[in-house]
């Protein structure tokens, strides 16, 4: 893997858990000087204002180059036309300046009053969050995904995972992002950059525009120049390849679909992110919904099963009209890799 995640997680998580429990790594640690800057290493996600290490590259909404879902204006419109008043007139789909909300389900009136100003204690959030929802974004890059969510659709998601493995966090995990309908109150969501899945019988789809064989016979991921002329990725001169050269065909919601797999960098970062989330939120079990034979369920869960479910799941497990994260996602690669990483961090 590109990042020494096991070493980082084993040390950083021990310190992090002690900080959550005791307010610092050591009761006897020296007091920082006034005006001293707190050190970050660039792999932290944010939950209730606390930084949690992942071992993967993370850009938060507070960082240069980040994507800020708290802002009300359109991110990629001309600045003099991006304010909410102008945006609401220019884009009819934009109905509210807030692309996120308050997690209220299951809270008492007293707890709502406590958290509605932003004051979520992490233990309370840990009691309420029990699902981690995986999506493919259908946009191909995280920059384009945020453009669609923020500027056109009144939607949001906590994380976006780009093709080079960069994780973008757009909101604190205390927020209710608008990504998974009935599971929004209880879930954390990640949009994985991938152009998506298409009917297997159709020869006319975006896969031909995004994937081509290179001179070595391997499949290369080609981002159309119209999406940024190479300025869309955090990693300079990145050349992406799906982890498997051939498109994968599989059944989702009873439909035969074709899709290319994620990049190796995406799998590395997704495993690191999932481990950090499962360790931070113990009610999210490190598994996916399973059939009796152990295979991952490939259709929407019955509502009573979804209501009870605690763990990692796809968007298609929640809604019948969704097919993401698609047939190419290697669920057991993610689950087994996450479990291995978690065991090394414990």
Image (tube, rainbow, N blue to C red):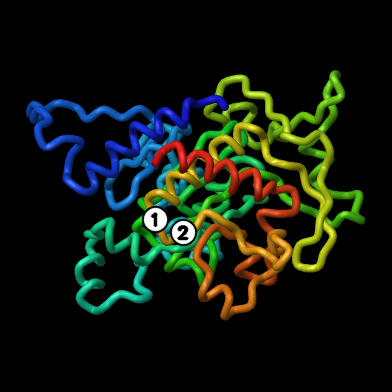
The number of callouts visible is 2
Q: Secondary structure at mark 1?
A: loop
Counting from the top left corner in percent of width and height, residue 281 is at 39, 55
Local crowd at mark 1 within 10 Å, few (<14), some, or many (≥20)? many
Q: In the depicted view, which residue is nearer to us: 238 or 8? A: 8
In the displayed structure, 43 sits above or below 96; it is above
In the figure, 113 relative to 163: above or below? below
**SS for callout 2:** loop
Q: Position of residue 269 (x, y in %)?
A: 54, 37
Residue beneath the point at 31% across and 30% down: 40
* For residue 151, side relative to residue 346 (left or right): right
Observer able to see residue 346: yes
Quadrant of the rendered structure where residue 210 is?
Answer: top right
Q: Nearer the viewer, residue 126 or 170?
A: 126
Q: In which quadrant is the N terminus drawn?
A: top right
Going 29% across and 52% down the picture, which residue do you hit? Answer: 48
Discs 2, 1 touching: Cβ within 8 Å = yes
According to the picture, the residue beneath numbered tag 1 turns out to be: 281
């Amino acid at each position: 893997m590109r990042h020494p995640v096991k070493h980082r997680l084993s040390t950083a998580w021990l310190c992090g858990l002690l900080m959550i429990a005791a307010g610092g790594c050591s009761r006897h640690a020296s007091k920082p000087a006034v005006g001293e800057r707190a050190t970050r290493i660039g792999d932290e996600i944010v939950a209730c204002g606390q930084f949690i290490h992942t071992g993967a590259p993370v850009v938060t909404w507070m960082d240069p180059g980040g994507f800020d879902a708290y802002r009300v204006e359109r991110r990629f419109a001309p600045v003099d036309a991006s304010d909410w008043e102008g945006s609401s007139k220019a884009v009819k789909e934009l109905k509210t300046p807030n692309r996120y909300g308050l997690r209220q389900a299951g809270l008492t009136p007293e707890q709502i009053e406590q958290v509605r100003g932003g004051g979520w204690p992490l233990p309370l959030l840990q009691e309420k969050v029990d699902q981690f929802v995986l999506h493919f974004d259908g946009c191909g890059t995280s920059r384009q995904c945020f453009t669609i969510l923020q500027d056109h659709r009144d939607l949001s998601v906590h994380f976006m995972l780009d093709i080079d493995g960069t994780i973008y966090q757009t909101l604190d995990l205390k927020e209710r992002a608008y990504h998974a309908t009935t599971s929004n109150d209880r879930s954390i969501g990640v949009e994985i950059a991938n152009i998506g899945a298409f009917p297997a019988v159709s020869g006319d789809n975006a896969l031909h525009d995004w994937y081509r064989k290179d001179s070595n016979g391997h499949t290369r991921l080609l981002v159309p120049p119209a999406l940024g002329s190479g300025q869309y990725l955090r990693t300079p001169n990145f050349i992406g390849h799906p982890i498997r050269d051939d498109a994968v065909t599989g059944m989702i919601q009873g439909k035969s679909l074709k899709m290319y797999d994620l990049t190796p960098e995406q799998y590395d970062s997704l495993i690191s992110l999932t481990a950090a989330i499962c360790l931070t939120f113990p009610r999210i079990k490190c598994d996916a919904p399973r059939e009796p034979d152990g295979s991952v369920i490939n259709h929407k869960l019955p509502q009573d099963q979804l209501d009870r479910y605690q763990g990692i799941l796809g968007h298609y497990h929640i809604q019948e009209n969704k097919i993401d994260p698609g047939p190419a996602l290697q669920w057991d690669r993610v689950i087994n890799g996450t479990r291995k990483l978690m065991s090394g961090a414990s």
